[in-house]
């Protein structure tokens, strides 16, 4: 009998702490040996010569729109796109229809994914005024990544605009809570500033820096009062980053590939409402501050906020055009291009997309290349040059804001618990993705 089910040979293995040549032996879906495995037998061999072998990338913020909005995306189409992009695991958001606010609705999402998806997954439980008081028990539901709160309105109806309801949610739980920080009262007040005939260039004017900072400060006041750990999603402003540097005992920080790569006004000139998202893509001053926060360790996680809408929906006159853009399939190539251009060390990218999610959310058995952990890998070619194209996208909406972007670095294979689910741009194997597990 072979010693291993799969051996990855001749690759350069990358962790947040080291990089070097090693073979990887996988047995029963877990890492069983790392090093020079010589001629030890395996049922399957993968020659990774010339490739870099990373821990499986985890995207901790995606919207797959099922149930209720399947014309935009489904669990199957979204996770297929993830696998094709080198992403081995995702956390999916609760603003579907109905909103995912009970254990029964979590169970429904898990059932919808069963036997249809190639990668591992978890779902956020939406926090709102209907379930505050139950969340401490419900956040332990299998497959739950944590509680998610919207302080500012976005797609759907899941919204907590007032401090009274927010405090009830903050006080009701012990796991880290993920929060979309925009101040809804200020957003409502400023929406009247948008002139007739405005374009998406107005989006960062309407949803301004003060809206983001004010909500983040409100959240941290309550988090500190109740000693609740919080995760501030998709931070976009220099002012928030400066504030959050002093809050790291309680707050972890996420940035998005979109906000690191795009900048106003150019993105709105080129893409119009296709570049519209919440919080907005802002100007170069803010983008530079995000990169500085990545460099100095303020940022804990890099994600996408994959949030697809059809072209027809995005073509509505602003501000009726919906906010959000797809991204789970382009995360790895876009960020590898930043690595190639010297903006980001490869080991830091690994930390932000694997070890970071494991630390922040208490993810069990994932996020590391280490014996006993789930054998999740993202195998990349750092020298490959490709052009990102709409036609490549597996998302149901069929477009990407990075269409036409020439990149260096490309995902060549995705391995989930020892099964190669993508190789050379093709989905392989069976759809056997499972629910992720978390520390209580």
Image (cartoon, helix red, strand yellow):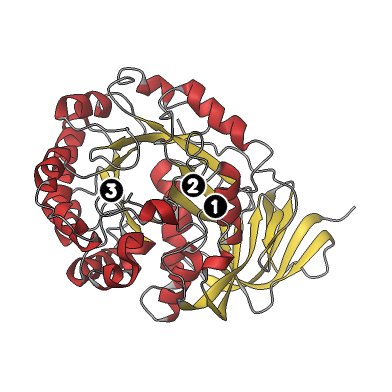
Other residues around mark 2 within 10 Å, as few (<14) / some (14–19) / many (≥20): many
Residue nearest the observer in this picture, 358 or 139:
139
Q: Residue at left 14%, top 47%?
A: 191
Between marks 1 and 2, how big is the CA–CA gap?
Answer: 6 Å
Say whether disc 1 or disc 3 marks the residue closer to the N-terminus: 3
Location of residue 155 (image quadrant): top left
Residue at image position (20%, 68%) is: 283
- Residue 337 visible at all: yes
Residue 101: image x %, image y %?
40, 26
Q: Is residue 174 above or below residue 133?
A: below
Q: Under tag 2, what secondary structure?
A: loop
Residue located at (38% from left, 63% from top): 257
Residue under label 3, please give it. 320
In the image, farthest residue toward the top: 133
Q: Is residue 208 visible?
A: no
Q: CA distance from mark 3 to mark 2?
A: 17 Å
Looking at marks 3 and 2 on the same chain, the residue that comes earlier in the sequence is marked by 2
Question: Can you identify the residue that label 1 sits on?
Answer: 396
Q: Are marks 1 and 2 in contact (CB under 8 Å)?
A: yes
| Residue 308 image position (x, y, % from top left) | 44, 51
Circle nearer the N terminus (1, 2) = 2
Q: Quadrant of residue 426?
A: bottom right
Depth check, mark 1 against mark 3: the one in front is 3
* SS for dot 3: loop
Instruction: Say which residue label 2 marks.
Output: 72
Mark 1 burial class by Cα count in 10 Å: few <14, some 14-19, many 20+? many
Is 165 situated above or below 309? above
Q: Residues within 10 Å of mark 3 (few under 14, many from 20)?
A: few
Residue 289 at what x, y percent from top left?
Answer: 21, 67
Which secondary structure, mark 1? Answer: loop
């Amino acid at each position: 009998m072979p010693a291993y089910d799969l051996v990855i040979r001749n690759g350069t293995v990358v962790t947040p702490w080291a990089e070097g040549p090693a073979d990887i032996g996988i047995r029963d879906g877990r890492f069983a040996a790392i090093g020079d495995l010589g001629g030890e037998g395996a049922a399957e061999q993968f020659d990774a010569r010339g490739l870099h072998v990373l821990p499986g990338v985890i995207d901790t913020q995606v919207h797959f729109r099922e149930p209720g909005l399947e014309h935009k995306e489904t669990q199957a189409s979204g996770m297929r796109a993830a696998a094709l992009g080198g992403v081995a695991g995702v956390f999916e958001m609760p603003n579907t229809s109905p909103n995912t606010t009970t254990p029964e609705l979590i169970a429904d999402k898990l059932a919808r994914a069963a036997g249809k998806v190639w990668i591992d997954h978890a779902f956020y439980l939406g926090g709102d005024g209907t379930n505050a008081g139950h969340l401490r028990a419900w956040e332990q539901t299998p497959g739950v990544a944590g509680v998610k709160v919207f302080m500012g309105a976005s797609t759907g109806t899941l919204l907590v605009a007032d401090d009274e309801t927010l405090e009830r949610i903050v006080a009701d739980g012990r796991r880290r809570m993920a929060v979309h920080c925009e101040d809804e009262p200020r957003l409502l007040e400023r929406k009247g500033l948008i002139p007739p005939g405005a374009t998406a260039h107005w989006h960062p004017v309407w949803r301004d820096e003060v809206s983001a900072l004010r909500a983040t400060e409100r959240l941290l006041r309550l988090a500190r009062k109740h000693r609740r750990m919080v995760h501030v999603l998709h931070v976009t402003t220099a002012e928030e980053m400066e504030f959050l540097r002093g809050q790291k005992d309680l707050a972890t920080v996420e940035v998005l590939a979109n906000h690191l790569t795009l900048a106003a006004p150019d993105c709105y000139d080129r893409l119009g409402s296709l570049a519209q998202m919440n919080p907005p893509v802002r100007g170069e001053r803010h983008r530079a501050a995000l990169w500085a926060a990545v460099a100095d360790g303020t940022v804990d996680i890099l994600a996408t906020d994959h949030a697809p809408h059809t072209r027809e929906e995005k073509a509505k006159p602003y501000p009726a055009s919906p906010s959000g853009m797809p991204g789970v399939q382009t995360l790895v190539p876009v960020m590898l291009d930043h690595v190639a251009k010297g903006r980001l060390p490869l080991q830091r990218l690994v930390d932000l997309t694997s070890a970071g999610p494991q630390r922040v959310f208490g993810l069990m058995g994932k996020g590391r290349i280490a014996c006993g952990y789930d054998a999740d890998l993202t195998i990349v070619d750092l020298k490959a040059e490709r052009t990102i194209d709409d036609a490549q996208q597996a998302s149901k909406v069929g477009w990407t804001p990075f269409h036409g972007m020439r990149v260096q670095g490309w995902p060549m294979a995705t391995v989930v618990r020892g099964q190669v689910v993508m190789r050379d741009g093709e989905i392989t194997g069976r759809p056997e993705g499972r629910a992720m597990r978390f520390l209580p």
